Image (cartoon, rainbow, N blue to C red):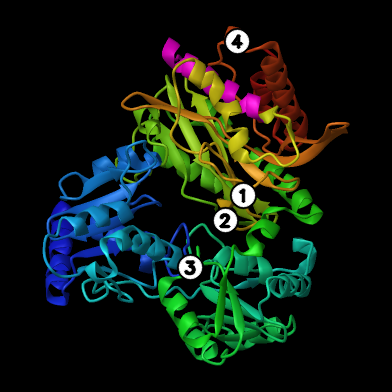
Amino acid sequence: MENHILQRIEALRSKMVSSGFDAVVVTGTDPHSSEYPAPRWQQVRWLTGFTGEAGDVVVTASHAGLWTDSRYFIQAAEQLSGTGVELHRTRQSDSVYIPEFLRREAANLGEDRSYVVAYDGLCMSAAAVDEIRQALLPLGEDKFELVSVDNLLSPLWTDRPAIPDEPIAVVPDDMTGESTAQKIDWLRSCITAAGADMMLLSSLDEIAWLLNVRGSDIEYNPLVISYLLVSETSVKWFVLKDRDRGRLAEVMASRGVETLPYGELELSLGETSGATLLVDKSTLSSSVDALLNRFCDDVKYATSPVQLRKAVKNPTEIASQRKAYIEDGLAVEKFLYWLECEAAENVTEWEASERLTALRAEIHGYRGNSFENISAYGKNAALPHYSTPREGSAQIERHGLYLVDSGGQYLTGTTDITRTVPMGECTPLEMEDYTLVLKGMIDLSMAQFPEGTAGCQIDAAARLPLWKAGRNFGHGTGHGIGFWLCVHEGPQSIRQNFLSQPLLPGMITSNEPGLYREGFHGIRHENVVLCREVQETEFGKFLGFETLTKCHIDTSAVIVEMLTDQERAWLNDYNAEVYETLSPSLDEDICAWLREKTRAI
């Protein structure tokens, strides 16, 4: 693999020389700023061998670097070894990000000419290009040039996959709680309020939510590669769908949506002369941004209103998600029973992962996993986003800790759950770390906070037990979760980084503190919670969380003395609720096993 990577980077450098480029930026996303791009746009993986979901690359004549965050530090170090690609760690106090790196490179050029930075305009957001431009501006506008090259790697990537073209499901209104027409009417009111005539949407989960459609163009994400242009009089959906186009067009037309070929976006934008167009720059590709500024008289940039509206689930979605977490909990409990009571002594991480997927697949309405299972034993769990290998995965031994982070996509919703499983005798340090992380998860579960509080303001609730012991974790504590959509969504999050978005009733968010000791073990406890109003006093409204996840938390590795009375009561009540909810649907043997697992401590 290393030789292939070296050859690819050298081939890119040859192209840079012939094109007059000093630097090339390669992003880890697609034309729609998707977190998980389809194979066609997995350019970072092809160029460097790094398989993590978050990573961007810069190649110069003398340097190749990958920028990624702490979730992938260990993984990136291993995968980049021998490739000549240097790891740049982000979200650290001394991190130098790509715009600043390019500025320093340009300042050191020492030649009387412009520093030329090339990038794939289709796969870099307009906002990201602006960040680079702003970083280079102090050098003088004549000292740099930004060059957009669509499909920049295609001449080198000769077997590059095609744009996916998978079947589309049109979701009935009674499953979503709101019709496409109602959502479009709401969006039109937002467009008018913003002083615009129309809006272009490029974020795939926003389009899927707005049109009540789901697809499978991106693995684990029920999305359709497309653009959407909404005006007062029309809704145009640009989608690459040759299969069953007539039937799809007919169904969408009945919903007031005109279906057009994916490649005709530029043609339609050419007909918008005189219009004021609203667009979200954070998800808009630089290339499409250039088209808008060529064709439209006025382009207004603003955060898409769809993001927040989508995050606040309606009563139908909430009721459906509750059902999804019960069904999903049954599958995970069956898996945990199998792992403890039926699995062979030498079962591997991969075999365990496959078993869990098979149990989820038995659920009515299952539509695949919501992300790649993380099935990690012992030291492998110290990689927060460990990728379980099909061949040569580790055996799960009958001692220590096994971590499984997984989720499902169902007609009833999207799930995400992590359980760290004591496989037998644990060391005192494993038990202490296990208990500290659990305390953090419980304390955040019990949090009560005033209306208007942002996730970053309560993040410390999950970290304080760890901080007091001189420990921490590098990833966020909580992310939003879609309704039969992406397992990661915004705008809310629970993390240390400042984000002003308040947590609102109806938002569904993960609660997943962790702790990772490289070479030893990793621990993460994750439940998914629903934000809801809990009381109103003379001091205002107060919000809290309802835990949706229904799967027991193993108490065998808990150091009970480390729990407060309130934490112990929460844990006992939670496990009792899990047993009461799931036991009627479990076989007798599993039910008896779960009864023991959920006994009060």
Q: Could you classify mark 4 by the number of other residues whose Cα lies within 10 Å: few (under 14), some (14-19), or many (20 or more)?
A: some
Which contiguous range is marked in magenta? 425-444
Query: Reading the chain from its start, which is encountered first: label 4 or label 3?
Result: 3
Numbered disc 3: secondary structure: loop
Q: CA distance from mark 2 to mark 4?
A: 37 Å
Q: Which residue is mark 3?
A: 32
Q: Main secondary structure of the magenta part?
A: helix
Residue 98: x and y, percent?
A: 31, 54
Residue displayed at 29% across by 40% down: 392
Taking the image as drawn, is residue 485 in sight? yes
Vertical comparison of 374 with 133: above or below: above
Taking the image as drawn, is residue 29 in sight? no
Q: CA distance from mark 1 to mark 3?
A: 19 Å
**Label drawn at residue 486:** 2
Query: Reading the chain from its start, which is encountered first: label 2 or label 3?
Result: 3
Vertical comparison of 423 with 81: above or below: above
**Label drawn at residue 481:** 1
Tag 2: residue type? Answer: Cys
Residue displayed at 55% across by 19% down: 465
**Label drawn at residue 560:** 4
Numbered disc 2: secondary structure: loop
